[in-house]
């Protein structure tokens, strides 16, 4: 009976993790197809509209390094519950339809998602140590599918009689609401070990002084930068090329759905690979093909959207895997996670705004995607360095297999 109870609790927790994963992208990536409507409704400049997708990333970068401290103070379960409440409140506030509520709500939901982003990998590593690749792949898939559905549905919802973009974006409240309800049983269990969120320095190696740690952080940051530029402005490029808003939303959703696919096969394969340099370069090249294709031949947007989704989805998985493979223990991995996500999302937060500014200066969305193509080259270089079979503090490749490190 006891074994059956433990198994039931694990199933319940796994379901909660997947429900939390639905909240990690959809609440803000689904705003991309509505961005031009919001811009016209609130009379925003292109750069100001870019803040709608930049602010969550800025919140990620600012809050991520603080999350381990928050989790130590509150406990992982309570911190996660608070994060889901913040995410839901932010969605509701944003849906009021004014400039101040748009930006304030976006910041609040960004803070909530930031906490979930950092804690979820640690939660998986703590409670499912023997199923990390499988559960990571499932929650990566869940993120992509929920983000894709959000992008496809928001435009038709905004056109519903009596509705507008505020009502359409407000429907996303259902995601953190359901996740929070599923999380209530976990709040009673506040005595679990919190080793997964401890980030006190271990050993003599400083992450901030490690070239390898910076390579991993840069790889994670460039991945996020490229992805969120595309998430923010792909619909605008397509509508300027003659696509309807609904068609642009469909391609936008297809790109996000494609970003979930690499999680199904890449993590189990990487589990047995000692060196990931070639994989990092190849998947960066796939993303490059998509951004260059959009700039040159936007009429084939569905193909290029799939390429961007596959490429950035794979590099995101690699970035998460590198955090495990390039570190010696859970505490160091948590520290690198905070560093990579903090630096990475701060870097990415400037992407939507800078892309909007590039458009305002050049009058062309193609220029934005040419710039993204150049970024893909630097992504490949960072991936080549991050993919070496070496851990922080080592000076040469370690012949010992890293199997299971992720």
Image: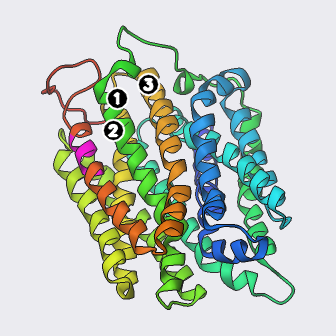
Which residue is under mark 1?
213
Could you tell whether 66 is left or right of 373 in the image? right
Q: CA distance from mark 3 to mark 1?
A: 15 Å
Which residue is under mark 3?
330
Q: Position of residue 177 (x, y in %)?
A: 77, 56
Q: Residue at x 66, y 31 (%)?
A: 76
Q: Is residue 380 magenta?
A: yes
Among numbered discs 2 and 3, the one appearing first in the sequence? 2
**Dot 1: what SS?**
helix
Q: Quadrant of the N terminus?
A: top right
| Mark 2, other Cα within 10 Å: few <14 / some 14–19 / many ≥20 | many
How many numbered marks have been drawn onto this rendered protein structure? 3
**Dot 3: what SS?**
helix
Q: Position of residue 325 (x, y in %)?
A: 31, 34
Instruction: Indicate which label's residue lies in the foreground, 3 or 1.
Output: 1
Q: Position of residue 3 (x, y in %)?
A: 57, 38
Q: Quadrant of the C terminus?
A: top left
Magenta-drawn segment: 379-384
| Mark 3, other Cα within 10 Å: few <14 / some 14–19 / many ≥20 | many
> Residues at badges 3 and 1 in contact (C-beta under 8 Å)?
no
Task: State the mark number for residue 277.
Answer: none
Q: Residue at x 78, y 70 (%)?
A: 42
Residue 310 sits above or below residue 197 on the image: below
* Residue 405 visible in the picture: no
Camera-nearest residue between 157 and 352:
352
Q: Residue at x 83, y 67 (%)?
A: 97
């Amino acid at each position: 009976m006891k074994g059956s109870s433990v198994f039931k609790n694990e199933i319940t927790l796994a379901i909660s993790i997947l429900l939390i994963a639905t909240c990690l992208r959809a609440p803000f990536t689904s705003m991309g197809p509505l961005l031009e409507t919001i811009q016209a409704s609130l009379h925003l400049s292109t750069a100001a509209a870019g803040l709608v997708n930049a602010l969550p990333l800025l919140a990620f970068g600012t809050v991520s390094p603080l999350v381990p401290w928050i989790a130590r103070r509150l406990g992982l379960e309570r911190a996660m519950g608070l994060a889901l409440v913040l995410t839901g409140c932010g969605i509701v506030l944003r849906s009021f339809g004014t400039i101040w509520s748009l930006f304030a709500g976006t910041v609040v939901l960004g803070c909530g998602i930031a906490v979930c982003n950092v804690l979820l990998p640690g939660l998986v590593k703590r409670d499912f140590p023997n199923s990390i690749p499988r559960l990571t792949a499932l929650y990566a898939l869940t993120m992509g599918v929920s983000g894709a559905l959000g992008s496809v549905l928001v435009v038709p919802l905004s056109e519903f009689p009596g509705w507008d973009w505020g009502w359409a974006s407000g429907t996303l409240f259902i995601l953190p609401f359901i996740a929070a309800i599923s999380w209530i049983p976990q709040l009673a269990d506040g005595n679990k070990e919190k080793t997964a969120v401890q980030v006190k320095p271990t050993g003599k190696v400083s992450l901030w002084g490690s070239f390898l740690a910076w390579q991993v952080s840069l790889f994670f940051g460039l991945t996020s930068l490229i992805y969120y530029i595309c998430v923010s402005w792909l619909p605008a490029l397509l509508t300027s090329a003659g696509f309807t808003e609904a068609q642009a939303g469909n391609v936008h959703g297809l790109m996000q759905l494609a970003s979930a696919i690499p999680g199904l096969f890449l993590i189990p394969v990487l589990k047995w690979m000692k060196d990931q340099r070639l994989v990092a370069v190849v998947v960066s090249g796939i993303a490059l093909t998509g951004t260059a294709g959009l700039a040159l031949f936007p009429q084939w947007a569905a193909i290029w959207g799939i390429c961007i989704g596959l490429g950035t989805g794979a590099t995101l998985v690699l970035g998460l895997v590198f955090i495990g493979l390039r570190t010696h223990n859970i505490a160091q991995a948590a520290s690198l996670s905070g560093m990579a996500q903090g630096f990475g999302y701060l870097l990415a937060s400037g992407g939507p705004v800078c892309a909007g500014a590039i458009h305002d200066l050049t009058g062309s969305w193609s220029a934005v995607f040419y710039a993204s193509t150049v970024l893909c080259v630097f992504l490949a270089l960072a991936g080549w360095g991050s993919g070496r079979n070496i851990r922080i503090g080592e000076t040469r490749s370690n012949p010992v297999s890293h199997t299971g490190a992720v």
